[in-house]
Image (cartoon, rainbow, N blue to C red):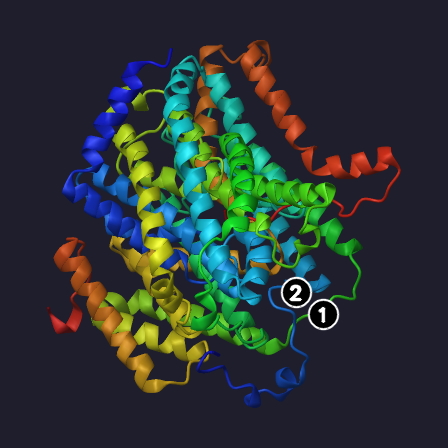
Amino acid sequence: MISQAVFGDLLHGFGTVLDPMNLLWAVLGVTLGMLVGILPGIGPALTIALLLPITFNFSDPIGAFIMFAGIYYGAMYGGSTTSILINTPGESASVATAIEGHKMALRGRARAALATAAIGSFVAGTISTILLTFVAKPIGQLASEFQATDYFAITLLAMVAVTAIVGHSMVRGLLSLTVGLFIGLIGLDSLSGAQRYTFGTLRLLDGVDVVIVIVGLFAIGETLHVASKLRSTPDRPAVLEKGRLRTGYLNKSDWARSWAPWLRGTALGFPFGAIPSGGAEVPTFLSYTLERRRARKAGRKHPDEFGDGAIEGVAGPEAANNASFSGVLVPLLTLGLPTSATAAVMLAAFQIFNVQPGPQLFEDQGTLVWTLIASLYVGNLLLLIMNLPLIQVWVQVLKVPRPLLYAGILVFACLGVYSLSGSGYEVLLALLIGVVGFFMRKLDFPIAPVILGVILGPTMEEQFRRALVISNGDASVFFTRPLSLIIIVLTVLALFVPYIPRLVARIRGTRPTRDRLSFGEDD
Amino acid sequence: MSTDERPEPATDPAVADEPVRTADVEVEASRTVRIVAAVVLIVLSGTFLVGVFDIRSPDGLDPQGPRFFPLLVTAAWLVLSVAYLVEGLRSPRTTKQPGDRAWFEPVAVSALLILYAFLVVPLGYMIATALLFFAIARVLGSRNTVRDAVVAVALAVVVYVAFTRFLDISLPEGVLGL
C-alpha cells in the first residue's frame, strides 16, 4: 500500500545527499553542531541561530539544509555529552539525561552512559525518520485541504499549547507570548501597508528579524545572565578523568536494560514532537518518569538505581529527545508550523532562503524536502560513527574556560546579527532584546513563547484577516467549520493541561507534588 | 581537573563570605524588582495600546484592518501585566537578591557591545572584534592576559578571513584595509 513513489523520492534524496560536496556539508554540519552543542549552556536553538550566518552565502538551499540537519543532530548529541560529563544541560530536554547520566559518570560508568545515549539516539533518530518519511507526504496532502480559518486555529493552538506547557507560570508565559506577538507587529502591515510601531524610523519598516530576536534573547540575554552570576556560582564541576572514561562500552546487561527504553522513548518522542507541545521537553520527562515507574513496579535487580545512575534513565529520555525532532519536522514541513523554539529557528532559516514550508512544499521543493529527510538518516549515522570512538576528542571542548566561552558566544552573536544586515544598528537592537532577555531570565519568564509569537503572530493575523475577508466579516466562520472548531476547542483545553495533576490529586484526595505540571524551556 | 582561573573573590569580601549556592538553582528576583517590572510592563503596554490609534487605517478598528490585531495584543498585554503586578504585590517579602555586585558584569558587557556597534565600521572587524573579545573575557573574570590576547586576535583573524574569503560575507575592513 505504501506508494513506491516515496521510495523513489527518498532514493532520489539519498542520491543528492551522497554527492561528495553535499556529504561534506553534512559532515561539516554535524561537526560544527557537536562542537557548539557540547559547550555548556548552549542548546540546539542557539547553536543553529549562531551558525546561521555561515549559510547566508549558500546560493542553493539544499546544501544549507543538509548542514542544518547535521547541526541540529550534532547539537543534540553534544547536549547529552555535556549533561553526562559535567551535569550542565544546555536545554531542558537534556535534564533527565543529566540526572541519571551524570550519576553514572560519577560512578565510573561515563562510557556506558555516553554509549547508551548515542546508540539510543541513533536508534530513535532512524526509526522516527522512517516514520517521518511515510507520514509527511500524506499529512501534507491532508493539509492542502486547510483553509484560512484552520490555519488561524492551528497557529493559535501551537502558540497557546507551547506557552501553557513550558515555564512555571501561566501569566508570565502569556506575557512572554504577547511581547513576542508585539515584536511581530512591528513594521509594515503585509495586507494594508500601514506602518505599525515603526516609531518613525525607516529601519523598522521591515520589522524585526527573527534571527535578531533569537540571538538577542538566547545568546546575549544568556551571556548577560551568566555574567551576573559568575561570581556567585561555584566552580564548574570537574571534567571526568581520562582513565575513568575507559571502562568500555555497553556490556551485556546494559544492552538488555537499554533496548526497551530506547523503543519506548521513540514511541513517546515522535508523536509528542509532532503535536504542539514545546518539542522535546514533555516526551523526555514522560520517558524518564515511565522508566522509573517501570523499574519500581517490576522490582527488578536495579530498582533503586534511579536517582543514582540508572541506565534506563539515560536510554529512554535520549531516545525520546531524538525521536521528537523528526516529529517536530512533521508540522514544520507540512504546515509551516513550528512547535518548539528550535523549530522556530529552523523556520527562520527556511525563510531566509525564500522556502515556505507548508502543504505545497512537497510539490514545489520536492528535491529539497527529500534531500533534507535523506540527510537525517545520514546525519544520524555520521554522529554514531563520530561519537563512540571520538568522545575523548569532544571532551576537550568542555575544558574551554567560561569567560572565553561567553566572550566567544558574543562575538559570534554579533557576527550573525551584523552579517544579516551589515549595520551596527542591528547589533544595538539585538543588545536591547538581550537586555530584555536578561530581565526575563531574572524574573523567570519563559523565552520560547516570545520566539513563537514573533514567528507565528504575523501568519496568524494574516490567516485571521483572510478568513474574515472571505466570509465578508462574519466571525462565525471560526466556529462553523468543524476542523477549525475542533482545533479551537483543543486550544482552550491546552490552557488547562498544566492544572491536570492538581485536579487529579484533588479527585484522589492526595496532595499534589507540585502546583503545576511544568517544564523548562530552550528546547 | 579544575578550571584554571576564577574571578577574584578577594576583591569582594561580602561575596566571598557567602556560602556557595547550589549550582543552577535560580535565585528568584525580589518582590521589589518584580513590582518594578510589572509597572514597566503596564506603562509599555499602555503606551502601545494608545499607539494603536497612530496606525493609519481607513476602516477604524475593523477586524479586517491593520489596527485590530495590535489592539488585541496590546490590550491582552496590559491585562496580563496587571495580573502580574497583583501576583507581585501578593508575594512574600522574604526572597533575597544576590549581591549588588551582580549588576556590574551585565552592565559592563552591555556597554562594551554598544561601543562595538559604533566602532566596528571605523576600526574594522578584526580590530574591533579582538578588542571586544579581550575586554569581555576580562570583565567575565579571565586573568590570563597573554592567553586572552592570543585567543582574541586569532579568533578575530580566523573569523574575518573565513567569512570574507571563503563565505563571501563582507565585513568592515577598517583601518587595516585588508
Q: Earlier in the sequence, mark 1 or mark 2?
A: 2
Q: In the displayed image of the protein, which residue is found farthest to the front?
A: A252
Q: Residues within 10 Å of mark 1 (few under 14, many from 20)?
A: few
Q: Nearer the viewer, residue A423 or A15?
A: A15
Q: Inspect this view and state whether residue A197 appears.
A: no
Relative vertical location of residue A467 with respect to residue B176 in this rendering, above or below: above
The quadrant holding residue A414 is bottom left
Q: Is residue B172 left or right of residue B42?
A: left
Q: Chain of mark 2?
A: B
Viewer-nearest of discs 1 and 2 = 2
Query: Label 1 amino acid?
Result: Lys
Q: Mark 1 — residue?
A: B96
Judge from the rendering whether residue B106 lies leftward or rightward of residue B94; answer left or right: left
Circle 1/circle 2 CB separation < 8 Å: yes
Q: Quadrant of the N terminus of chain A?
A: top left
**Residue A386, horizontal then vertical, whole percent:** 32, 53
Whole-percent x, y for residue B147 in the image:
32, 82
Real-space CA distance between mark 1 and mark 2, rounded to the nearest whole angstrom? 8 Å
Instruction: State the image coordinates of residue A93 (x, y, percent, origin top left).
Output: 53, 48
Residue A428 in the image: state x and y as whole percent: 38, 59
Tell me, for residue B16, which label it has, or none.
Answer: none
Instruction: Kindly tell me whether residue A357 is visible in this rendering.
Output: yes
In this rendering, is residue A404 above or below A443? below
SS for tag 2?
Answer: loop
Q: Chain of mark 1?
A: B
Residue nearest the observer in this picture, A343 or B61: A343
Q: Residue at x 50, y 39 (%)?
A: A181
- The residue located at (33%, 43%) in the rendering is A381
Read off the residue under disc 2: B27
Q: Amino acid at mark 2?
A: Val
The outermost residue toward the right is A509
